[in-house]
Every structure is written in structure tokens, then in C-alpha cells.
Image (cartoon, rainbow, N blue to C red):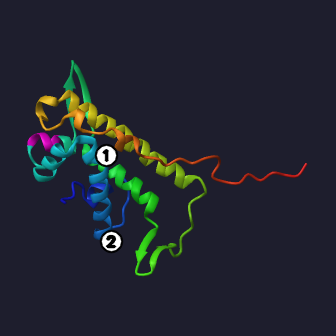
Amino acid sequence: MSALITQSDVRNIRRLAESFDADEFDAIVNEVQEFYLESLIGAELFEDLINNPTSEPNAKLLCGEYYTYSGTKYKFKGAKVYLCYLWLYKYSLEGQVKYTNSGRQNFDVDYAQKSQKGIDAQVINNFLSKSQAIGEEILLYLERNSDNYSLYKSEDTSKVPNKDFNFTVFGKTFTEFKAND
């Protein structure tokens, strides 16, 4: 499957090491494209987007645009931004886990400190909420511009991918110090 985003696209949003492993990047891209974007926009439009990413309507769907609807101007961020935030979300959840010949392994970074407790959850939730908001924006854009997207059929799509994010932090992510009375 062709990747709709590149490492450069993600770097426009957050820092990503120049030496980031291409296979690892592509595996996450394929997952978020297939499990989230395809379900969100439907199989027919998704297939067309993969096969014809440079056609005018598909380029606008991918890259976003300013458009006018009912006399009001809107800025549509585009599916690439959606995929980038989904990529960041998935990588934030699973990035430290590596798959080896003997199973999964968590790698610690040499000469680095772990982030403060609770910060990771905040970062993940931030990527999650931005992904969800942009996913809703994609659906609205497709509805408002349905003349340009005949392959989009809202009844053939699922809003579940945009609601399927299930990352929740229960309680506090740190232990409070309580002095004895």
C-alpha cells in the first residue's frame, strides 16, 4: 500500500530524528491508513486516494484547503495532518516497544531521563484529541463538498475509527506524598 504521508510530513508537526527507521515509520503509516482513514472515508474513496493522490479533489482532501460553504470561509487541514497526528499517537503509545527474535522488548534511551509522570499521558491525549477533531473535520468537508467526492458515501463509512481511540488515564498518574498526621 502506498503511504499517504512521509517522515517530512510528520516533521512539519513534531520533531522526528533524521535517522528514523523507514520500515518502522511505514508500518505505522500503513496501520493508521488502513484501520482509521479507510474506515472513516470508505473503501472506494480510500482506494481512489491511494491510486490517484494527485488528482485535484484527492490532493485537496490530502493537503487541505480554504473553502467557502454557505457564505462562510473555512480552513480544512486535510487528511495528511489527520494521519500525522494518528502516527504520532500510535508511536507515542508503542514507540519504545521493539520486536526482536525473542519477543517484545522495551528499550531505554542512553543518557536520557524519562519524562515526568503524567506528561506522557498528556502528550498522548493531545495527539488523540487532535486526531479526533481532524477526523470530524474530514467528514464535514466531504459532506459539504459531496459534488467533488462521488465515491464518498456516508452510509458506507464508519465513525467508529474516530471514536475507537480508547486511551484513558484513570486517576492520577503519580503518587501524592501524604504526611502522617
Tell me the residue at 27%/37% (across/down): 138
Q: Quadrant of residue 76?
A: top left
Q: Tell which circle, 2 or 1, labels the residue nearer the N-terminal end.
A: 2
* Residues shaded magenta: 56-60
Q: Which mark is residue 34?
A: none
In which quadrant will I find the N terminus?
bottom left
Tell me the residue at 28%/60% (across/down): 7
- Find residue 33 and report its horizontal and vertical position in percent: 27, 53
Q: Which residue is mark 1?
A: 82
Main secondary structure along the magenta-highlighted residues = helix
- Find residue 57 and report its horizontal and vertical position in percent: 12, 39
Q: Camera-side residue: 71 or 100?
A: 100
- Disc 2 on helix, strand or loop? loop
Instruction: Based on the picture, tell me whether residue 59 belongs to the magenta stretch.
Output: yes
Q: Amino acid at mark 2?
A: Ser
- Disc 1 on helix, strand or loop? helix
Q: Could you tell whether 15 is left or right of 118 in the image?
A: left
Q: Amino acid at mark 1?
A: Tyr
Q: Nearer the viewer, mark 2 or mark 1?
A: 1
Q: Which residue is mark 2?
A: 19
Circle 2 packing at 10 Å, graded few (<14), some (14-19), many (20+), is few
- Find residue 126 and report its horizontal and vertical position in percent: 46, 46
Farthest residue, direction bottom = 101
